[in-house]
Image (cartoon, helix red, strand yellow):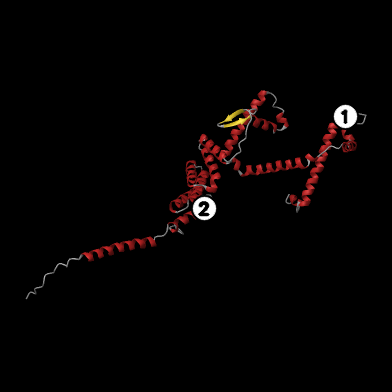
Amino acid sequence: MMELREPPRPPASVGPERAVRALLFMILAAVLGVGALLVLRPAPGDRDAGGESERDRRLAAKLQAAGALEEAAVRYERYLERADLEPEARAGIAYSLGSSYLEQGDLQRALRWFYEAELWGAGELEQELGRKIVHTLERLGRFHAAQSALDSRVRLDGEAEVVRGPGDPVVARIGAEPIYRSQVERALDELPPELAQRIRTPEDRREYVRQYVAEKLLWRKAQKLEYDRDPEVARRHAAALEQLAVARLIEDEVVGTIEVDEADLRNFFVANKERYRQEDAEAEPVLDQVRPLVERDYRLSKLQSGYQALIDEQLAAEEVELFLEAMEEGR
């Protein structure tokens, strides 16, 4: 016989309180799920620690040191995309990128990354970054932009402004920079005597102004292309500075102390009288007849003895060892 079963009944309707509790439970579960995700997700600063971005940075540094500039730049760009960095750190990487592209001759990309570094805030790299921007603009042929950037950098360096009187007129102008007569005259005074003697007429002076301005223009171009930072130029500059400073020291401590004592001068003349005897002259020389020559030689003698005394004093004051035989080793 067929078994007759009771048909299924619809579930009892859910009361309002149970419905509200179910809804609250679902919301709570969702909130807890989101919270768990937030807790488990790494913080921005830790996201790349020891990851791909850090490997890109280390690899980029090694490639750059090895001279593989193109691949180093690619890795640095990837590093900037992935890493979470402070603005100043980003500026430093952007500066490295710009320098790599500049060495490769990719001037457009170099300028892009130098500007990126400037926008992020270069901090301690600000002056160096300014030089690189001027350099790149100059090589790109954007001469006015390069000059504007150079002028801006000079103003930031805080060059003291010189107050000029009405007796110091402007004799030339390079862009917005005036060239004053006193500047040209100082340059004339610093010429070697044999060159200064050639500049006599007004036309000679006008021609010298043209030359002075031309040298200023060449100096600007050398600055833009950073020849003033070339290691060999820096070495020569240091050597010239050393010589000028020593010359000033000798001028103050030796030349400035020389006095002509009449009795000492006569003794010097008597001891060196034969030096001043004219050829085929029977009579002995007289001091008053050759005084300028005697006084010149007397001062020179005093200078040499004073210079030697200054050297001896310094050698005695410092711990100095001389290994002169080493100059001849291997010759």
Residue 278 visible here: no
Q: Is residue 329 above or below residue 169?
A: below
Q: Position of residue 75 (x, y in %)?
A: 47, 51
Q: CA distance from mark 2 to mark 1?
A: 77 Å
What is the residue that sits farthest to the left in this orientation? Answer: 1
* Label number found at residue 196: none
Residue 326 visible here: yes
Horizontal relation, residue 1 to residue 305: left or right: left
**Which quarter of the rendering shows the N terminus?**
bottom left
Horizontal relation, residue 327 to residue 131: left or right: right
Q: Quadrant of residue 14?
A: bottom left
What is the residue that sits farthest to the bottom in this orientation? Answer: 1
* Label number found at residue 61: 2
Q: Is residue 263 above or below residue 321?
A: above
- Judged by depth in the image, the label closer to the viewer, 2 or 1, is 1
What is the residue that sits farthest to the front in this orientation? Answer: 17
Identify the residue shown where x is 26% and y is 63%: 23
Q: 10 Å neighbourhood of mark 2: few (<14), some, or many (≥20)?
A: some
Q: Position of residue 315 (x, y in %)?
A: 77, 50
Q: Amino acid at mark 2?
A: Ala
Q: Quadrant of residue 217?
A: top right
Secondary structure under tag 1 reads helix
Residue under label 1: 289
Q: Amino acid at mark 1?
A: Gln
Tell which of 33 and 282 is nearer to you: 33
Horizontal relation, residue 256 to residue 182: left or right: right
Horizontal relation, residue 272 to residue 253: left or right: right
Identify the residue shown where x is 59% and y is 34%: 218
Secondary structure under tag 2 reads helix
Total numbered circles: 2
